[in-house]
Amino acid sequence: MGRKVTVATCALNQWALDFEGNLQRILKSIEIAKNRGARYRLGPELEICGYGCWDHYYESDTLLHSFQVLAALLESPVTQDIICDVGMPVMHRNVRYNCRVIFLNRKILLIRPKMALANEANYHELRWFTPWSRSRHTEEYFLPRIIRDLTTQETVPFGDAVLATWDTCIGSEICEELWTPHSPHIDMGLDGVEIVTNASSSHHVLRKANTRVDLVTMATAKNGGIYLLANQKGCDGDRLYYDGCAMIAMNGSVFAQGSQFSLDDVEVLTATLDLEDVRSYRAEISSRNLAASRASPYSRVKVDFALSCHEDLLAPISEPIEWKYHSPEEEISLGPACWLWDFLRRSQQAGFLLPLSGGVDSAATACLVYSMCCQVCEAVRSGNQEVLADVRTIVNQSSYTPQDPRDLCGHILTTCYMASENSSQETCSRARELAQQIGSHHISLSIDPAVKAVMGIFSLVTGKSPLFAARGGSSRENLALQNVQARIRMVLAYLFAQLSLWSRGVRGGLLVLGSANVDESLLGYLTKYDCSSADINPIGGISKTDLRAFVHFCTERFQLPALQSILSAPPTAELEPLADGQVSQTDEEDMGMTYAELSVYGKLRKVAKMGPYSMFCKLLGMWRHIWTPRQVADRVKRFFSKYSMNRHKMTTLTPAYHAENYSPDDNRFDLRPFLYNTGWPWQFRHIENQVLQLERAEPQSLDGVD
């Protein structure tokens, strides 16, 4: 009897409710797996309908169309002679479950519902689904007529069970179950399951990939066994980017690594592994075997099929590999760029319009579009016909083949420098030089006539003319004059996005790109409905610190010397009058805190879940060698006052790529009020009492504070 098994897992770029496209990608992955000799194919979580359907899960249409796709899969000759494991929502006794449907040769073997639902941060599965809570228990599921007619089965097992083939035993986990303290793979492994599969929809967060890899390798290191992880990839219509990283591991080592960022819609990993390696590995772990002898058994679904071939002595087996990680700068250059590509091709627009200010944030956004162009050109060079077809549709040229990222950038990116009387020549030059180096179609214009016209209307109605603070005006006048400039830039950005291609005799419109970073959003250091308002924002979930590191990385990686002068300039909005021709306004001075401090506040507020008093206590220790308790208290109060005062701006925040766990995105991720008592009287008084106690104490008790 054979003992070498070839198994396949995949990463698919599925799209919510794109049943036609999702079906074709699933079929293609099964075909590739079969051609490589695999006898088991695992796909991502909820791959039939796409993970990000959100409240569409409530609709009977979503369930109906999922079963229609399942019927098409069961009927297809592609799915014969390979165990197929697909994900879809299933309603059982009027309760919706997130399920795996496992089938072979037109027969459904098992419907396995998810037992631990992801319900934190960006995930809200408990809103739509119920976890299956009956461990090691199955029930009869009555198949709908559309499936019953195909399989001639009336009922199939539904619940927590494993598959017993002629040669091995296979168990399923679904995404979150791997992350729970007592994962199902532990009990399944103790009960003799040798292959565990995990269908995921796990999104990209900077510096997260190692956590996923560690969980998979540790699962097989402690208990032995083979582990397959599938994942969604790409943008399925929301702020998240699912970053692939499909993998196959055995006995604590990785044997196949999928790409984290790629423009391939279908990526299949296969490995040929020896089941005897699992058995010999487990044989000498006496503590595991002692626990296994007491394990409660799973019900086994018997499968008249083998994953191995009868004669496989000469079949080559896969070798372990070292996992290759991207640096955070590489992650930024690849993840948001892939997300932009999915948005561009699926929105059927002709390109992007980016207000390019000459500062770090808009320069970083331009670099992401350029990085996207590099990846597209690379995919075309490597023979990806889908990418080539998408490019030709976008530029509306049936024979166009992108040879060079600069050439492609010239077709799909329009950059626009919008000067005012408060703009410096330096920022204008920096924007122009960067545009030349990446090859974008660049426009320079002055917004002064529009600003004067709008302010003229106000003066005509009120008889008053506001002044900047530098010219004797109040803070209210100063802020209003800044905001008018910012909002006019937004109006012009959308005007040029709609008509600039028309003016050049080219078909289509452009998506407006925003470039407010996560730290500015957190503090509300942006004008509501200014050019932070856009169609999408690829840097909206990335900190200023990471963006600066990314721009520095791009200087070398993409050979863009213009970025050096952008990095060396102080960040400024350029909305106040120049002083002797020089910029008089800087971001950090306006905010009253540095970008580095903002990242700390953001992580403590969101990730560590701290209110004002808890944050004050934490920072007392963190900053004891830098600031006195009074100075720490002042900083915490300033942050919370400004954060709460501007929280309302998050309700209109442009949909942004999610990259940081301290994102203040009000729409899906950071569910907090937007109308606060900005004085925080109770909380701040509590901080003040603590400061007074510390100040009355002996100086030496302040642990080094001077």
Image (cartoon, rainbow, N blue to C red):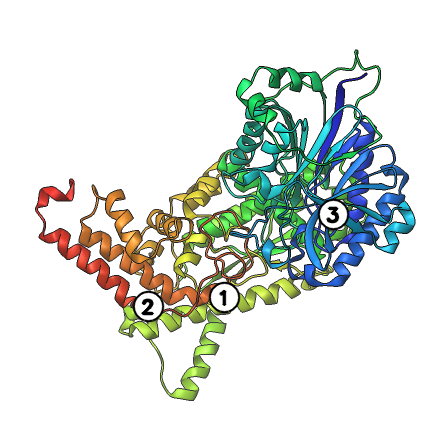
Task: Give the residue type that dot 1 points to.
Answer: Thr
Disc 2, disc 1: CB below 8 Å? Answer: no
Task: Give the residue type that dot 3 points to.
Answer: Glu
Return the mark for residue 314: none
Q: Which residue is mark 1?
A: 651
Left or right: 26, with 255 as reference point: right
Q: Position of residue 330 (x, y in %)?
A: 53, 36
> Which quarter of the figure has residue 319?
top right
Q: Residues within 10 Å of mark 1 (few under 14, many from 20)?
A: few
Residue visible at 31% across and 52% down? 615
Q: Quadrant of the N terminus?
A: top right
Residue visible at 56% across and 32% down? 213
Q: Nearer the viewer, mark 1 or mark 3?
A: 3
Count of numbered labels shown in the rendering: 3
Which mark is first along the chain, 1 or 2? 1
Left or right: 360, with 618 as reference point: right
Q: Which residue is mark 2?
A: 678
Q: Quadrant of the C terminus?
A: top left
Which mark is first along the chain, 3 or 1? 3
Say which of 420 and 107 sits in front: 107
For residue 489, above or below residue 237? below
Q: Which residue is mark 3?
A: 139
The residue furthest top is 314
Secondary structure under badge 1? helix
Left or right: 593, with 451 as reference point: left
Left or right: 151, with 387 as reference point: right
Mark pair 1, 3: CA separation: 45 Å
Mark pair 3, 2: CA separation: 54 Å
Say which of 607 and 296 sits in front: 296
Secondary structure under badge 2? loop
> Which quarter of the figure has residue 225?
top right
Q: Position of residue 254 (x, y in %)?
A: 61, 25
